[in-house]
Image (cartoon, grey):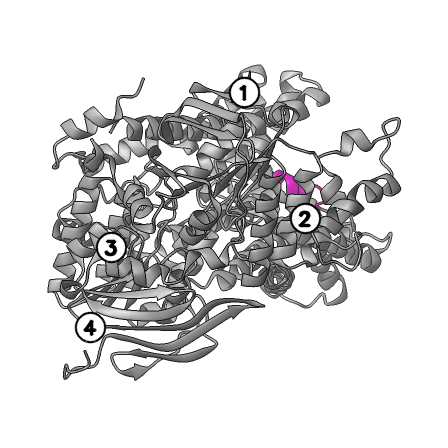
């Protein structure tokens, strides 16, 4: 690959990055040539985004080398990488909603007229020229507020072009786009490639990778796995490289007796978020909810639990209808919900471990309206021990614990309320491998005791390893319901990437 | 309710999700912008208040002292509101401006008393620099402390006031201790417009021009609109925030000079409570409290409106309690209006997206 005379636009070799004890990137390597579109694929948590943030100057690497046009480089800030000609389009575009589209493109390097005064007319004209070059019609004067994600990405691309970026990194740009919008984005990307720029394209959708890119690099568990020319590879090979390990040995799955239906969801619909979702979860069963980030999995779970409302459909627990938009009623009827972002939504990080665990059952612990520390500790101590929460004292603040132990405290908190159904969103995100296995064992045990479990996870091996049944969500719709024996990585990925246009 | 699949299929490639450029001429656009602006509606309210007061009592406007008071009284708040606007645009707030004003007002008096030979312009400069220095302290604490500006400036508000109290004690500067030429500034007029008002308006224009046309001015809006995005853009976020606090402090320092010139009497309690009036003026004038939008023109009209209401209502015969309540209602109305408009726009967009 390095037979070209000119050096690659971007070269990363054995780059690593850790956050405290969590290794986000073990050994990232990639080589991107000018005038090429290079796909970077890997499961969630494989380290792609960390790698991107190192190239963009948002993070500093711990070790390894970064070469731009063959020159060793070190970016201390996003401003430096920008000046060097690197433009990054993040999954969620980052624009200033209050400012005009034109100001968003030129912020920080506005065209100046006489007396260092911003020349608005020249900026509008330049923005118009950029949009024309991209083949889109956007009013350069309108505010960025209210633009669709697709149009926001066009603004980001216009920004990159006006910077004359030689390297354009797009982190899952198509995750929230419709078919037409994806086509438009691809047309623009090809045009930029033909101008001789290097493009890194991150996507979960294999059909897109094959349609757009000429080279693909696969990452797994924070490490470089391999690079292939697109013409010489297949979907099967890519999935193999991505998943890589034997799923079974990592996940201590125990066989359970599956009983009666606990949760029945029928025709659940919320305009613009998810559509016509129906499924059941039975006693002793672990149901995995798989799909791409942004497909609507968490939103479905939040609606079932009552955090968000929905406009049609019913949710039944043990045969009785659960009122919509009422989490307190849902808890009373036996539901428990462990959200994805535990720091924000699942834990009072400043409170003690005991206070957190006792939070949900506070009412039953009060004596004459008063809650004593002693009553809290008494109720909690058994749970903490069972979950092997490593903490020197129950009075310790939750914020000082590791991610894995925080997760265990959150689980303990809900188990104390003795639920029939546990909804758990991304149970092992940001947890080191050892603790991951403990959390998995715990979930498996709970199912063994007859609890019904609905587990949302972006990590395919986790879903395949843990779930008795896998539901796949794509663009707000259930696109597959696979039994454990039928659930292969290929089938789940296929269902997760099948867009409406293809399905209908 | 929403037929999602069919409509998206019917949409032709060319029209789907593209936003058409506006076909308006630049003059049409200007007229539209002005008509829809918050500044205009606040200005109309101001005109109505002045009209009501003048009809009830013509001397409110049509007497030499009435006219002068109408323009001079808001001068101090104008300066504070402009500084406050610059800070609020960056998604911060400066509650210490009242205390800075108190300190610099006393400093101004002390300088005249202790060094009678100092020229007025030197004293003004010292007050400006002192205010800027106190603003710098705020800015550094907010920029490096990672603590909300509300808390930091609440703290420095008490600290600066405490310094003034310790320094001044129970003594006060009186008009007899100040030079005639300085006190004249408070009453002097050029073509029947008071000098202090001219100074304030000049500052409003300068800061407004800066915010509209300088790179760093626009970056203040960007920082307030989305601080995380500003970092990704590679903007010097911390430097901009510190700069905003320096401007606010310097203008509070200048307001301290104005206070001394206008009232002649300065005690350690000078200017207490003005910080909240400055915030109120900005909010009424359409400056979004979460940063990113608003103009100093709006804040300036808001400041004049606030002061004028306080002077007009007693004349119309409305009791003290109702004056305060009315100001409160005005603030809440301004915020509710912003919220309603934002919600309506968000709902429209979601509907538009579901239909496409």
- Residue A113 visible in the displayed image: no
Q: In this picture, which residue range is highlighted in magenta?
A: B271-277
Question: Residue at the spot x=56%, y=57% of the render?
Answer: A437
Give the residue number, with chain letter if any, for mark 4: A33
Disc 4 or disc 2, which is closer to the eye? 2
Give the residue number, with chain letter if any, for mark 2: A409
Which of the numbered marks, if any, corresponds to residue A157? 3
Q: Are marks 3 and 4 on the same chain?
A: yes
In space, the residues marked 2 and 1 are separated at their CA atoms by 68 Å
Relative to B297, say whether B174 is above or below: below
Disc 3 or disc 1, which is closer to the eye? 3
Task: Pick whichever, B331 or B270, lies toward us.
Answer: B331
Disc 1 or disc 4, which is closer to the eye? 4
Task: Pick whichever, B158 or A287, lies toward us.
Answer: A287
Question: Residue at the spot x=37%, y=49% of the render?
Answer: A92
Question: Residue at the spot x=54%, y=47% of the render?
Answer: A254
x, y percent for residue A258: 52, 33
Which of the numbered marks, if any, corresponds to residue B54? 1
Task: Pick whichever, A418 or A138, lies toward us.
Answer: A418
Q: Name the chain letter of the residue that bears numbered label 2.
A: A
x, y percent for residue B22: 19, 36
In space, the residues marked 3 and 4 are separated at their CA atoms by 19 Å
């Amino acid at each position: 690959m390095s037979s070209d005379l000119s050096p690659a636009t971007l070269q990363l070799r054995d780059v690593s990055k850790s956050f405290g004890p969590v290794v986000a990137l073990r050994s990232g390597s990639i080589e991107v040539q000018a005038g090429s579109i290079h796909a970077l694929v890997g499961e969630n948590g494989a380290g792609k985004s960390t790698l991107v943030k190192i190239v963009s100057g948002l993070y500093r690497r711990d070790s390894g080398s970064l070469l731009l046009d063959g020159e060793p480089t070190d970016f201390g800030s996003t401003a430096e990488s920008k000046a060097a000609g690197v433009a990054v389009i993040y999954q969620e575009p980052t624009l200033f909603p209050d400012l005009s589209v034109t100001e968003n493109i030129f912020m920080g390097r506005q065209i100046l007229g006489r007396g260092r005064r911003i020349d608005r007319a020249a900026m509008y004209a330049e923005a118009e020229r950029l949009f024309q070059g991209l083949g889109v019609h956007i009013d350069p004067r309108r505010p960025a507020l209210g633009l669709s994600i697709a149009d926001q990405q066009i603004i980001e691309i216009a920004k990159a072009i006006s910077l004359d970026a030689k390297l354009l990194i797009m982190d899952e740009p198509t995750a929230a786009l419709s078919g037409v919008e994806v086509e438009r984005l691809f047309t623009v990307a090809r045009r930029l490639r033909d101008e001789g720029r290097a493009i890194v394209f991150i996507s979960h959708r294999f059909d897109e990778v094959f349609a757009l890119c000429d080279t693909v690099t696969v990452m797994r568990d924070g490490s470089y796995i391999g690079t292939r020319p697109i013409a010489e590879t297949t979907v099967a090979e890519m999935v193999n490289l991505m998943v890589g390990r034997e799923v079974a040995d990592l996940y201590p799955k125990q066989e359970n007796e599956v009983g009666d239906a606990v949760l029945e969801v029928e025709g659940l619909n919320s305009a613009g978020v998810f559509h016509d979702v129906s499924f059941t979860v039975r006693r002793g069963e672990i149901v995995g909810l798989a799909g791409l980030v942004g497909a609507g999995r968490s939103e479905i779970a939040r609606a079932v639990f009552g955090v968000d409302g929905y406009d049609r459909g019913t949710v039944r627990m043990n045969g009785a209808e659960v009122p919509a938009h009422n989490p307190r009623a849902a808890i009373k009827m036996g539901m428990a919900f462990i959200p994805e972002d535990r720091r924000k939504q699942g834990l009072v990080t400043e409170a003690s471990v005991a206070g957190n665990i006792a939070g949900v059952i506070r009412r039953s612990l009060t004596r004459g309206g008063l809650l004593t520390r002693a009553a809290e500790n008494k109720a909690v101590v058994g749970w903490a021990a069972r979950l092997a929460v490593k903490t020197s004292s129950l009075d310790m603040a939750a914020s000082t614990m590791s991610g894995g132990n925080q997760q265990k405290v959150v689980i303990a908190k809900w188990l104390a309320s003795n639920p029939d159904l546990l909804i758990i969103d991304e149970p092992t995100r940001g947890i080191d491998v050892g603790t991951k296995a403990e959390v998995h064992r715990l979930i498996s045990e709970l199912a063994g005791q007859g609890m019904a479990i609905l587990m949302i996870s972006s990590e395919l091996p986790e879903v395949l390893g843990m779930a008795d049944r896998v539901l796949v969500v794509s663009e707000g719709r259930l696109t597959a319901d696979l039994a454990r024996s039928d659930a292969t990585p290929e089938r789940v990925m296929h269902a997760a990437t099948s867009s409406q246009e293809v399905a209908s | 309710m929403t037929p999602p699949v069919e409509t998206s299929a019917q949409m032709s490639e060319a029209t789907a999700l593209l936003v058409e450029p506006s076909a308006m001429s630049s003059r049409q656009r200007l007229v539209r912008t002005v008509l829809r602006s918050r500044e205009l509606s606040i200005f109309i309210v101001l005109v109505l208040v002045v009209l009501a007061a003048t009809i009830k009592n013509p001397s409110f406007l049509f007497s030499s002292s009435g006219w002068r008071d109408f323009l001079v009284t808001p001068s101090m708040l104008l300066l504070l509101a402009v500084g406050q606007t610059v800070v609020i645009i960056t998604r911060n707030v400066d509650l210490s401006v009242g205390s800075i004003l108190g300190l610099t007002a006393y400093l101004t008096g002390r300088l005249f008393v202790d060094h009678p030979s100092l020229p007025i312009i030197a004293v003004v400069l010292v007050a400006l620099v002192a205010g800027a220095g106190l603003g710098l302290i705020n800015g550094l604490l907010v920029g490096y402390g990672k603590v909300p500006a509300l808390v930091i400036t609440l703290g420095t508000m008490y600290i600066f006031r405490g310094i003034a109290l310790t320094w001044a004690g129970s003594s006060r500067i009186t008009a007899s201790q100040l030079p005639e030429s300085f006190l004249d500034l408070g009453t002097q007029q050029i073509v029947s417009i008071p000098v202090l008002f001219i100074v304030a308006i000049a500052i409003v224009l300068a800061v407004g021009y800066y915010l509209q046309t300088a790179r760093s001015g626009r970056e203040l809006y960007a920082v307030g609109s989305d601080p995380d995005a500003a970092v990704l853009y590679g903007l010097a976020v911390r430097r901009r925030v510190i700069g905003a606090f320096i401007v606010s402090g310097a203008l509070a320092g200048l307001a301290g000079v104005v206070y001394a010139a206008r009232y002649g009497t300065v005690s350690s309690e000078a200017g207490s409570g003005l910080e909240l009036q400055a915030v109120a003026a900005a909010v009424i004038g359409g400056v979004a409290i979460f940063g990113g939008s608003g103009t100093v023109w709006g804040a300036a009209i808001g400041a004049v409106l606030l002061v004028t209401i306080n002077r007009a209502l007693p004349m119309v015969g409305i009791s003290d309690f109702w004056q305060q309540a009315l100001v409160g209602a005005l603030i809440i109305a301004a915020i509710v209006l912003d919220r309603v408009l934002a919600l309506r726009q968000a709902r429209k967009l979601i509907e538009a997206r579901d239909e496409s």
